[in-house]
Amino acid sequence: AGQPGRRSVSPRDRLTYEYNVQVSKYFWLTTLITSLSSFIPLLQQIQSNFVVVIHPGSRMLRIGRATDTLPVTIPHVIARRHKQSGQPRYEDAWLLREGLNKPESNEQRQNGLKMVDQAVWSKKMSNGVRRTPVSAEQARAYNCQIRPAVLDSSSRVKWTNTTHHPPHLVGEEALYVNPSDCYNIHWPVVRGQLNVHAGPGGSLTAVLADLEAIWGHVIQKQLDIPLKDLKYYRCILLVPDIYNRQHIKEVVNMLLLNMGFSAIIVHQESVCATFGSGLSSACVVDVGDQKTSLSCVEDGVSHRNSRLCLAYGGSDVTRTLFWLLQRAGFPYRDCQLSSRLDCQLLQHLKETFCHLDQDISGLQDHEFQTRFPEAPALLYQVRLGDEKLEAPMGLFYPTTFGIVGQKMTSLQYRSQGDSEDPHDEHYLLATQSKQDQSSKSAADRKAISRPGGGLDGEMSGQGGVGELSDLPRACGSGGGGGGMKGEMELGPAQGECLMGAGEVEEPLSAHLSRKTAIMSQFESKALGLDKAILHSIDCCASDETKRKMYSSILVVGGGLMFHGAQEFLLHRIINKMPPSFRRLVDNVEVITRPKDMDPRLISWKGGAVLACLDTTQEMWIHQREWQRFGARMLRERAAFVW
């Protein structure tokens, strides 16, 4: 203050100066926050744009960015060039499968067809009149006289050009590889699981290499994402509700370490279907090309006991249609189930002609074209009657498919354990006190004698340890109702085990062996679609949950896209549901096209929705975490019980 030339500052001026500085900081921060808030949606948009959603199906692959309106959809097939000249050609079957050429197959088909015809006749048409059956001989007399008309001397369809000897071809190009070329054809996914088999290209390593080649090709060529840039992208993988843990672990390993995605979320198809349809709760019925899976989903969680996988789907309907067409004198007489192009034609005929509308009756004339490489384009006339209805009804009477000696129903099994994840449920069970274990053993012994047949606990079985609450409850006086009889009943020996055990103590080994027998018999049954829905809902824990499921049965996938399917399925569910629930459920609803969406895309769309949810941030498994902890991360981060 005493220095010459410097003016002293009063306390008042100093306060004024500090106030102005603080006001300026406030306005600057306010402006910055406003700018950032307008930028946050852009950041979220960029993040979703860097998420790839993959839904691998048995016949079709759906893959795209989470921000895409529609995914890229291609046949999930690869053609691999022979490594040596003279190597025998190999091709995975498409419509053919094991169990079709047994001595009992034809008899089983005929019996199934009789049940179908009886069901068709018993249900009246909307005008109150019973449907008049049409004999296949009536159509055969006309079709046997038909000769094709030549539309064009050239079909304008060509085989895939392989003169540059590409090591592999993917999708449509693979389907149109000339059988005389040196390529093997592989479908890496069969009935929802990796197609591991004893033939060429059937090892787990080879199947994973096929998946990597197909997915990498689509990502690079159709999504325009260079594979070297995948380190900037994340992936959402949709998996079946009933999954093979080892296979999922290997696929995740391939996506994170081989392809180089920075992070991944693994989620179940059924839960994603509810996300895609905008439903909080639903009994999800996914009718695919080769398998049909069912699961009751409530608030984003799939009820484990309600999961069921049936080993049939749209391809079995297509094959049954071919059998019925042959019986009716199909005019395209060179059609073979071993030909890829003929299989494509039969799929098209199924999608065009088949229906589940019982008001459509009598003989009707149709036409179709054949366009094959190195052949003229031909036009055929064909007269069909009940074949168009009988083929899709095989989904409700699966004995019509003629599959003998195969496992037709799969349930969810507990994990067998993994060396990478030592502190799993088995560790927890092993470290329980002896008192807890003895209490649990006593409870297990009593569970099998319950009148309702609800079998809790664990058992050893194929593929791991199974949950016995997955077993049919209709074997007793429980909620199965009259609609669960026939294929759902367990037979007298198993009935005595269930009903006659009482409170008698027995060795645990005998208890488990009885459970194994019941489980084995149940899995050999081919449940019809309506019975499987009733069983899945009946496995829910509470009546309130069951009521929710009956009021929201969501059908997704491409296997039930027939005219009249919604009304047909609704009628069968209402007629077969337990009488007690008919009074409790206000409205049974079957949803086949939520929001007018293509049912084949609903699960993929749900995966895209998942990428945008705030709650998914804690579900990401990052590449570095996977390298360090492996499968343990699936148990820690998966939105379902691993």
Image (cartoon, rainbow, N blue to C red):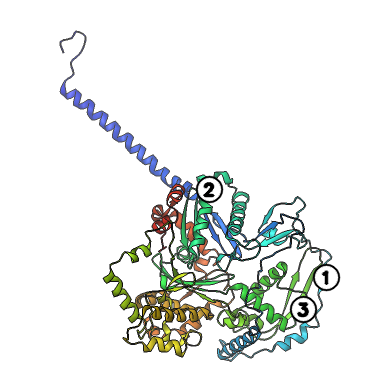
Can residue 550 be seen here?
A: no
> Within the image, what quadrant is residue 73 found in?
bottom right
Amino acid of disc 3:
Pro
Q: Which residue lies at the image location 76% right of the left edge and 56% below the top edge?
A: 85
Q: Is residue 45 above or below residue 501?
A: above
Q: Earlier in the sequence, mark 1 or mark 2?
A: 1
Name the secondary structure under disc 3. loop
Q: Percent from the top left, x then y, of residue 202?
A: 62, 63
| Mark 2 and mark 3: Cα distance apart in space | 51 Å
Q: Percent from the top left, x then y, of residue 381?
A: 76, 77
Q: Residues within 10 Å of mark 3 (few under 14, many from 20)?
A: many
**What is the quadrant of the C terminus in the image?**
bottom left
Q: Which residue lies at the image location 50% right of the left edge and 60% below the top edge?
A: 248
Q: Percent from the top left, x then y, of residue 224?
A: 60, 48
Which label number is shown at residue 468? none
* Residue corresponding to mark 3: 331
Name the secondary structure under disc 2. loop
* Residue corresponding to mark 2: 260
